[in-house]
Amino acid sequence: MDFRKQFAVSPGKKLKLAAIDPSQSGGHLSNEAAQPEISKYVTRMAELQALLYANADQSLLVVLQALDAAGKDGVVRHLFSGMNPQGTSVFGFKQPSASEAAHDFLWRAHQRTPAKGEVVVFNRSYYEDVLVVRVHELVPKAVWSKRFDLINDFEKLLTQNGTRILKFFLHISPEEQLERFKQRLDDPARNWKISESDYSERELWPKYTEAYEDALEKTSTAHAPWYVIPANHKWFRNLAASQIIAETMEDMKLKLPPTRVDLEEVRRKYHAAAAAQEKQNGKG
């Protein structure tokens, strides 16, 4: 199944999240049945990241957005753990610092975008500035409504500089979110994730839905597409996202860079060094 076609938000088309079943599983029956495919895609992602890092002429930015408990941390943990840490980083967008708030809303994001050869994952992102600020009325509509065009221009700039952009909205139901909140309460190892805002934010679910629909409609483009990933089943979330990432990286036509040295000269020096070492060992 081609999840890129199935879950992509078509540019310019009206989006209704209520029409997308967050419990669908693409015909896969279970976690156990999906694991071989997930493993295949995650392995391929790591292989392609090695080529990306070696050649250093392109980069990849993965944006994760979701309501609380939808699994952003899980995607990071399960899909990117096999990549070389030297060329991979994750940045979580929290409340702006005083310095960040003193600049334009894209300033802190631009500093964290990937350099050539890197994969960067944004756990939340600059999209918070058309989501949270809208829902909580932190800035007037006259301000946040203009940010969609600025975001599109920003992503176009990144693309023109060789950055491939993938954006995922992890789509869960209110019932599944509540169940995951219960798991956090019941499991001492997850208690630290509990926030007092978890339940107050739930009351704003309709406003968040409207804000997400608006943002995804207005900023899904051919060069920086949005994908709505059904995320009630964690394993299906991982399967769909890993397939999309792996296949997008395949499209980047990544390959090893050409050799930058005279191999014959290096071989000559190696053999000379090996002979000298053998002679030194013989004297010992």
Image (tube, helix red, strand yellow):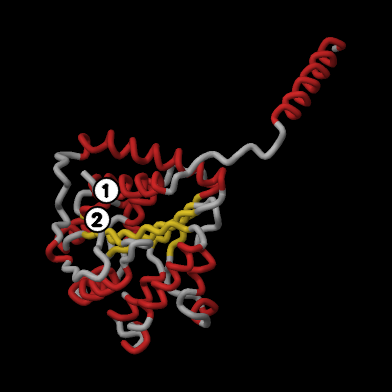
Q: Residue drawn 80% across and 16% down?
A: 275
Q: Residue drawn 27% across and 56% down?
A: 184
Left or right side of 223 for 207:
left
Q: Secondary structure at mark 2?
A: strand
Give x and y (percent) for residue 188.
31, 52
Label 1 sits on what residue type?
A: Ala
Q: Quadrant of residue 92?
A: bottom left
Q: Secondary structure at mark 1?
A: helix
Give yes or no for contact between labels 1 and 2 (Cβ–Cβ under 8 Å): yes
Give x and y (percent) for residue 97.
50, 75
Q: Relative to 273, does residue 81 appear above or below in the rendering?
A: below
Q: Which residue is mark 2?
A: 229
Q: Which mark is residue 227?
A: none
Give x and y (percent) for residue 206.
18, 74
Give x and y (percent) for residue 31.
21, 39
Q: Quadrant of residue 71?
A: bottom left
Name the N-terminal-most of marks 1 and 2: 2
Quadrant of the frame with the C terminus: top right
212 and 204: which one is in front?
Answer: 212
Q: Residue lying farthest right?
A: 283
Q: Which residue is mark 1?
A: 240
Circle 1 residues within 10 Å: few <14, some 14–19, many ≥20? many
Left or right side of 14 for 102:
right
| CA–CA distance in space, label 1 to label 2 | 7 Å
Left or right side of 211 for 29:
left
Q: Relative to 9, does residue 232 appear above or below in the rendering?
A: above
